[in-house]
């Protein structure tokens, strides 16, 4: 009986050491990887948007406005636009379920702006609600994939992807 107790105690401590070491290795690997903007990004994620704020005016640069010919083929296009925050009519929180992955979804915010009397920014962006009174810009947080990198949900759970904000018009969102 004493030998069995000693043997069980040894197994317990061995397992405890193994678990502690595994957790330590995981923590070291997890926190030693650093995000970077200097990588070979997929073409649709190579250009980052940015904004400049001046009172109630927000100048957004590199708003994505791609034309999609299929789910994997697109013609890239970006533009800059100034938005007046006083002209926000509504904010929409959108939940779009992923196909093939039950219970998971992509979410983004879409802001509806009152279109100015000049007809917006002059591009092909924005929604023609009723008499063309609104235009939309959407903001989404997405993983930023390197060329050749594929998404895997388990890697996503462990923060193994850089993130980026995608700012797009309604046509692209």
Image (spheres, rainbow, N blue to C red):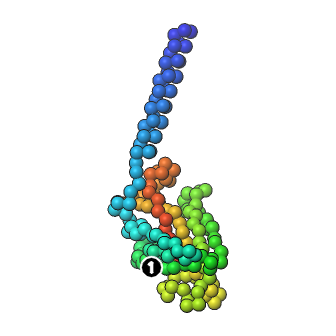
Report the front residue among 1 and 122. Answer: 122
Secondary structure of the residue carrying numbered label 1: strand
Q: Position of residue 164 (x, y in %)?
A: 47, 62
Q: In this rendering, does residue 97 appear at all?
A: yes
Q: Position of residue 81 (x, y in %)?
A: 49, 79
State the image quarter where residue 129 is shown: bottom right
Q: Position of residue 94 (x, y in %)?
A: 61, 68
Left/right placement of residue 157 relative to residue 132 reads left
Figure disc tally: 1
Q: Which residue is mark 1?
A: 79
At x 55% / y 77%, what residue is drawn?
57
Q: Position of residue 170 (x, y in %)?
A: 55, 77
At x 41% / y 76%, what residue is drawn?
76
Left/right placement of residue 45 relative to residue 170 reads left
At x 44% / y 74%, what residue is drawn?
62
Q: Counting other residues with Cα less than 10 Å from the Cα at mark 1, is it few (<14), some (14-19), or many (20 or more)?
A: some
At x 42% / y 78%, what residue is drawn?
77
Q: Quadrant of the N terminus?
A: top right
Considering only vertical position in the picture, is 96 above or below 162? below
Q: In this rendering, does residue 137 appear at all?
A: no
Report the front residue among 1 and 136. Answer: 136
Considering only vertical position in the picture, is 28 above or below 37? above
Report the front residue among 156 and 110. Answer: 110
Considering only vertical position in the picture, is 122 above or below 13? below
Query: Going by the picture, which residue comes out furthest to the top?
Result: 2
State the image quarter where residue 61 is shown: bottom left
């Amino acid at each position: 009986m004493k030998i069995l107790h000693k043997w069980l105690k040894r197994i317990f401590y061995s397992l405890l050491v193994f678990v502690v070491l595994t957790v330590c290795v995981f923590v070291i690997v997890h926190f030693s990887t650093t995000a970077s903007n200097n990588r070979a990004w997929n073409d649709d994620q190579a250009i980052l948007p940015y904004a400049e704020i001046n009172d109630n005016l927000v100048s957004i640069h590199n708003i994505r406005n791609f034309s999609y010919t299929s789910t994997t083929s697109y013609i890239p296009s970006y533009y800059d636009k100034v938005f007046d925050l006083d002209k926000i009519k509504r904010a929409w929180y959108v939940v779009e379920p992923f196909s093939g992955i039950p219970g998971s979804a992509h979410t983004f915010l879409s802001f509806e702006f009152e279109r100015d009397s000049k007809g917006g920014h002059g591009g092909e962006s924005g929604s023609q609600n009723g008499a063309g009174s609104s235009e939309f810009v959407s903001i989404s947080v997405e993983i930023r994939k390197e060329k050749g990198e594929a998404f895997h949900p388990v890697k996503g759970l462990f923060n193994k992807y850089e993130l980026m904000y995608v700012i797009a018009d309604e046509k692209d969102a």
